[in-house]
Image (cartoon, rainbow, N blue to C red):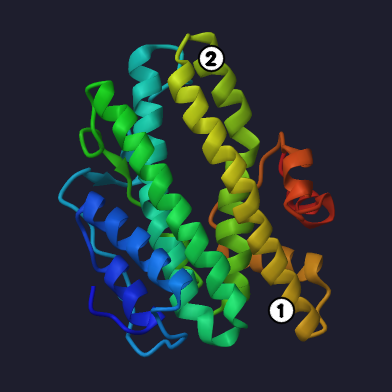
Amino acid sequence: MNATSLGAACAAVLNTADPMAKVRMARETARRWRRGALEHRFDVGLPDVPARPERPELLPPNRMPKRGRGGSERGRTALLHALAHIEFSAIDLAFDMAARFGAQFPRRFADDWISVGADEAMHFAILDRRLRRLGTPYGALPAHAGLWEAAEATAHDAMARLAVVPMVLEARGLDVTPETVARFEAAGDTASARILNRIYTDEIRHVGFGAKWFGYVSAEQDIDPAPHWQALVRRYFRGSLKPPFNDSARESAGLTRDFYAPLAQN
């Protein structure tokens, strides 16, 4: 990697299509940032859409095959593949967050989101390794084409990006993962359950970074954070917030019920 600025290094991650090459690039960028080998400078344009490998085939949500609730081995493998695709996309979301909005924030904003990007790269790598052991590597099944839509819709507004990506999309993972872990454990797949538990713990921290920086901007601009968050979610999130919510995990991340309860649809 020849990049000398954080912006250029993040752009290189986004422009790398091959999954394992992206993982290596993400990890190397995080290491160089921690060592002080990259300047806190954002001097390179970012792609509107990150580079993508030929596989998996990306389909609109209404064309995705039904995978069930993970009761069968085939269903559990399909679920792990879907989660791997989410983590692969999350690598790009984290590095885009750091580079696109880093100049608007103190240096520690980049510290947080580069660390998230390194986590997401690790999550993808361990899920892909598990899928290979199950005979279905990443790319073998189709995947959801809409995961980058939230990034495109909020590319102009740091608060909107923080509101939708970590505080809605990642927070949803906190709601559904404990039940998913329980289903894998009940099926005897403790190896996959351990992986999902590890990811779950990290995602609490990621949601916390979203809540922290949303609160930072709210304080800087003298904005009442919860109503403003709700307005941004209504405007930029395609979907609804559906219970049940993992209130304890959300609260430990700093995302309290006064944010999301008024938008909940039963």
Q: On the rendered image, what quadrant is the N terminus found in?
A: bottom left
Q: On the rendered image, what quadrant is the C terminus found in?
A: top right
Position of 263 relative to 164 (above/below): above
Q: Tag 1: Cα neighbours inside 10 Å, few (<14), some, or many (≥20)?
A: some
* Residue 14: image location, x then y, percent: 31, 67
* Residue 112: image location, x then y, percent: 57, 66
Residue at mark 2 to residue at mark 1: CA–CA distance: 41 Å
* Residue 92: image location, x then y, percent: 38, 61
- The label number, if any, that marks residue 217 in the structure image: 1
Could one spot residue 240 in this view of the protein? no
- The label number, if any, that marks residue 185 in the structure image: 2
- Left or right relative to 259: residue 36: left
Q: Amino acid at mark 2?
A: Glu
- Farthest residue, direction front: 35
- Left or right relative to 65: residue 254: right
Image quarter of residue 22: bottom left
